[in-house]
Amino acid sequence: MELSSEDQLRLNVLLASRPQAIRIDESRLIVYGLSERGEAKVALNPSGAALEAYLRAVKELISGYILGSPGGYPVYLRRWTRMGQMRDQSLEQLLMLGESEAVVAAVGSPGLTPELARRAWWAMEDAENARRMLRNPTIVASEMGPVLADYLVEYLPFETDHETMMESVRLVLQPGLLSDEKILELWQKSTRKQAYLVGFLRARPDDLPEQLQPRADADAIAAALADELSAGNALAGLLVRVTSAGGQRFLKTLSAVLAKPPNQEIVSAGFDLLRGYFAALRPEGDPNLVIEALLADGEAFAGLGGRVPVSTLGGIPDGAIERSKPDEAGPVPTTEQARRILDRLPMVAPDLAAMRVLSGAGYGLIRPLLPDPTTLGSLMRRKLTPAIDPLQAQISQLLG
């Protein structure tokens, strides 16, 4: 289709002015160009032609001028850019095509610069584009970082997907993006949104707002395990972390997430957080155990219930702790780390058992109770009670 002579002339003038980015408002039939002096615009005059075909002709003219390809944004470029294979030097061209797909490709490129991010944001303000750019450390550290974070915070009430909410909150809580006042305001809104709480837990597990007091025995535990901490005992470090003010707030917040999750996505996210936080107790990863087996495993790990004596945990004979030299023999097994702790503080055995249980929270807890992934709300919570209640009991143990 041929463009009107007036539109063709004005578009060529716009392109000859070397715009930094181009945006097409298809509903209002206006082509905008961004330059150092501000915005320029060309109001299109289809003169009775089919609008879709006319807009396609406009994009073909722009593409032919910018890329030398008259077919609009080429299909092969869509594939390459979506796969992250577009060369960084081509990003400027993508932003001048007036194509939303091209902007999406540009903002997802690891070679995106703060200046190109500014142009891309002018071309297409979009929550998903903001998230893509805030996954780029270069953009986070630039002047665009707070701009994108503020947009996502304002847009949060309109999000409907829980994973999107969790990711948005995680991204905006990166250091330097929001003021303390905005962080606290977002935290207060989180009391009614488990997805927001998950975002906080993912972003800053040890630095959540409104910190609690350390557990009453936190100082005594830290003092008793000072030598183990110096020796690099990961379980000792985790026990001290759990009983600190930050650890207590983490656990209480995660308990609130699990108390009334709206869907299985939030439950799985909560389990992922538990496994990640307590990963030092289970370096092999998710054990895929049902709740009964997980509780038994926790007791055995800490030598409770007469199942496995502490002196034989992991088959380590008495006296082996004093003879072993971790720096020569490689990493100390978690069972030996537990034994070292229990030799000094036998009363923390229930804490170690609880930590071990929480480190194994995974899909194995959900599968036998809730095979239908679409079950939501109160029915889902009722069916998951046999797994969630024991986990909450382990959290309560650690909260003292």
Image (cartoon, grey):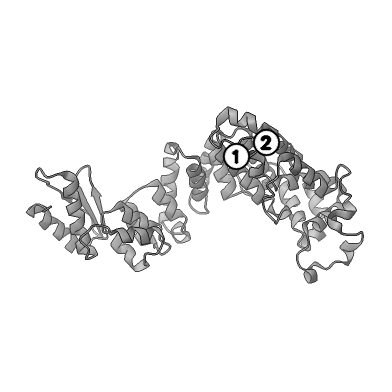
Q: Residue 388, labelled with which disc?
A: 2
Counting from the top left corner in percent of width and height, residue 280 is at 71, 55
Q: Give the Cα distance between marks 1 and 2.
A: 9 Å
Task: Mark 1 or mark 2: name the one nearer the start of the chain.
Answer: 1
Residue 332 at least partly seen: yes
Q: Residue at x 45, y 40 (%)?
A: 156
Residue with the mark numbered 1: 267
In front of the other: 98 or 223: 98
Secondary element at tag 2: helix
Q: Residue at x 86, y 42 (%)?
A: 305
Residue 217 at least partly seen: no
Secondary element at tag 1: helix
Which residue occupies the extreme left position in the image? 5
Counting from the top left corner in percent of width and height, residue 71 is at 22, 59
Question: On screen, 34 above or below 373?
Answer: below
Question: On screen, 331 above or below 189?
Answer: below
| Amino acid bearing label 1 | Val
Q: Residue 276, labelled with which disc?
A: none
- Within 10 Å of disc 1 (Cα), the crowding (few <14, some 14-19, many 20+) is many
Question: On screen, 357 above or below 237?
Answer: above
